[in-house]
Image (cartoon, helix red, strand yellow):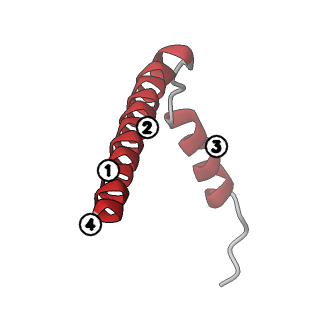
Amino acid sequence: MFEYEIVTAVRSADLIREAAEYRTARAARKAHRASLPSQEPRRPVRPLRDRFTRTACSAPHTA
């Protein structure tokens, strides 16, 4: 019975440590994600669409 209690205590400590690591990593990802839009300016999508549209429309028709 003593070995079982030791194993249970060790496993419980491992689970608590893993949960703390998970929470820390999740908070870091959330903070990183929140800082991305402020660091990188957003570019408008419209000029890219116009460029691709012109390319597709100017392609020769083979009908």
Q: Spatial distance from mark 2 to mark 3, Cα to Cα? A: 46 Å
Residue indicated by mark 4:
1
Tell me if label 1 and label 2 are in contact, CB under 8 Å.
Answer: no
Which of 40/9 is in front? 9
Q: How many marks?
A: 4
Amino acid on which the number 4 mark rests in the picture? Met
Residue indicated by mark 1:
9
Amino acid on which the number 2 mark rests in the picture? Glu
Q: Earlier in the sequence, mark 2 or mark 3?
A: 2
Which quarter of the rendering shows the N terminus?
bottom left
At 65% from the left and 84% from the top, the residue drawn is 63
Q: Earlier in the sequence, mark 3 or mark 4?
A: 4
What element does badge 2 sit on?
helix
The disc at residue 51 is: 3
Disc number lying in front (2 or 4): 4
Q: Spatial distance from mark 1 to mark 2, Cα to Cα? A: 18 Å
Tell me if label 3 and label 1 are in contact, CB under 8 Å.
Answer: no
**Whether residue 46 is situated above or below residue 43 in the rendered picture:** below
Tell me if label 3 and label 4 are in contact, CB under 8 Å.
Answer: no
At 32% from the left and 50% from the top, the residue drawn is 9
Which of 31/17 is in front? 17
